[in-house]
Image: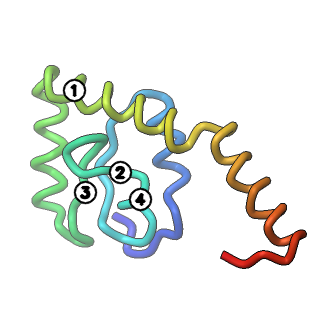
Amino acid sequence: MSEKESFGLVLLEAMYCGVVCIGTRAGGIGEVIQHDKTGLLVDVGDTEAASRYAVKLLTDDVYYRKLQEEMLVDINERFASDHITNQYEQLYQELINGQSR
């Protein structure tokens, strides 16, 4: 379990492959996973909760598919490369023009 995580790129990569993830509430992981909507979050070190969630995901196909469907829609909306590229281009343009956020 991660205790420190800047963003959680490995989570996005797994999610793009259709894997519903369990992550810790550390760093940027909570920005990637929306608890009980697009994956599951546990407190750092809470292996009991992580194991309960893992069993639930492995034994409840309906629940897994529900999270997976919402997860795929969410990551394609929020983290698609076109969306991210546009955000970077906007930021660079603001910096070039001397604008601050």
Q: Position of residue 53 (x, y in %)?
A: 15, 46
User: Distance from label 3 to label 1 (Cα)?
Assistant: 16 Å
Kind of residue at disc 1: Lys
Mark identifier at residue 33? 2
In the image, what residue occupies the spot 11% across and 26% down?
A: 60
Q: Earlier in the sequence, mark 1 or mark 4?
A: 4
Determine crowd level at label 2: few under 14, some 14-19, many 20+ residues with C-alpha closer than 10 A: many
Determine crowd level at label 1: few under 14, some 14-19, many 20+ residues with C-alpha closer than 10 A: some
Kind of residue at disc 3: Leu
Q: Position of residue 13 (x, y in %)?
A: 54, 40
User: Distance from label 1 to label 4 (Cα)?
Assistant: 19 Å
Q: In the picture provided, is 58 more to the left or to the right than 20? A: left
User: Distance from label 2 to label 4 (Cα)?
Assistant: 6 Å
Kind of residue at disc 2: Ile
Quadrant where the N terminus lies?
bottom left
Mark 1, residue position: 66
Which quadrant of the figure has residue 43? Answer: bottom left
